[in-house]
Amino acid sequence: MKRRQIIKSITLLPLAGGVAGTGLTAAAKAVDDIPKRDILSELGVRTFINAAGTYTMLTGSLMTPEVMEAINAVSKKYVQLDEIQDKVGEKIAALCHAEAATVTAGCWSALVIGMAGVLTGMDSKKVALLPFPEANGMKSEVILQKSHSIGYDKALTNTGVKLITIETREELESAINEKTAMLWFLNREAPKGNIQHEEWIQVAKKHNLPTMIDIAADVPPVENLWKFNDMGFDLVAISGGKALCGPQSAGILMGKKALIDAAKLSASPRSGIARGHKVNKEEIVGMYAALDNYVKRDHAKEWKMWEDRVAVIEKAVKSVPGVSTEVFVPPTDNHTPSMRIMWDPSKVKITKEQLGENLRQGSPSVEVISWEKDENMVRITVFMLQNGEDKIVANRLKEELAKVSA
């Protein structure tokens, strides 16, 4: 048959009646019956039960079915990147009591483009001058509390700014000068600082300076999504792949519209310093779906579930002689029911590193926090566990501790 005849015959197939239809249905069913590839097994990559938390090195959290549905749906269509950012930004801003928002390549990226927006405003010439603000006569200093300088502030220096650390209100007032571009606050370290949120904002407003707060892992509680916007911070940055259960490589920058618009000038698809901080349409929509789903959850019910999971594990490990526990809730980041598992080394002869490694190499593999400075102690969280995994973690911990119990 000639090519034209073949194409014509294909187009007529649906009209050929039951025989052709049955054949196509059978073919489609055959495709559905093809076993799905287990890529991780093919690669030889270890999977594990996550009783540690949403650490980046442990690939954050697992995306929910609602997020994956949104990602899969948008992956089949083309859109304009700016348009989908704008539309999603409007939805996120409404949920979080902000004037505007944009999806970023994680919280670090939100800090970078937020800082860039503060430095440049809507001046495209200034955008092109980053990361050399001081050399080009722009404001170039950011003030933060010394206790807040634990590494995440380095994101701000991607724009070329200099970090000025202070400890008291008096030092803060003295540090402000004509070069000061912004005051930055790390929420997870708030309990360690001398100056709290409201006072920080008050000083900034007195000197007509913008403020930014990093709340990367600081939900729950869900109210933190809008608390700091309502409080008066000009920019708020948060991770998407932690408790929100969005894409691990996504985050959100929200706040004053003028600063969000300015921040976008340094980000993809434009050629500013954050061009490489690219987020695709799937991540943008996935981040919105995650946020929307998170806000609508029954948070009281979820908290009770976490408490129940902790209780299951606590009961199991405390049955081992020499083992004790402490249930607690971190005050800021990863604010969920957690537990320290401690032991008397004269009765339970194992180091925290050995216990962590034994759990990691066992079957199934389990990750706990075994790298903190306290000896004879590991820490667990339960909010990343899937249904039934609390019992598995309980059994694995009990098994490993009982092996070395005198």
Image (cartoon, rainbow, N blue to C red):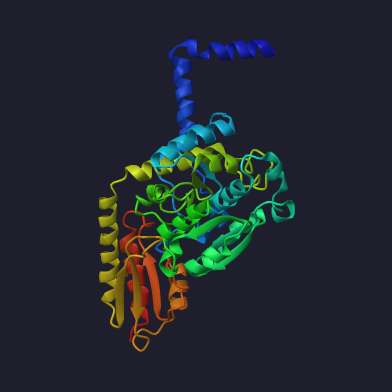
Q: How many marks?
A: 0
* Quadrant, the C terminus: bottom left
Instruction: Using residue 280 as the reference point, say whether residue 223 is left or right of it.
Output: left
Instruction: Tell me the quarter of the picture where residue 192 sits.
Output: bottom left
Instruction: Using residue 202 as the reference point, say whether residue 317 is left or right of it.
Output: left
User: Does 312 appear above or below 221?
Assistant: below
Q: Residue furthest right?
A: 135
**Residue at image point 69% right, 44% down:** 126
Where residue 276 appears, x then y in whole percent?
65, 47
**Residue at image point 46% right, 68% down:** 360
User: Does 258 appear above or below 221?
Assistant: above
User: Does 274 appear above or below 391?
Assistant: above
Q: Could you say which is closer to the camera, residue 7 or residue 70?
A: 70
Where residue 172 appears, x then y in whole percent?
52, 65
Q: Could you say which is closer to the camera, residue 374 or residue 38?
A: 374
Can residue 100 be seen from the camera position used here? yes
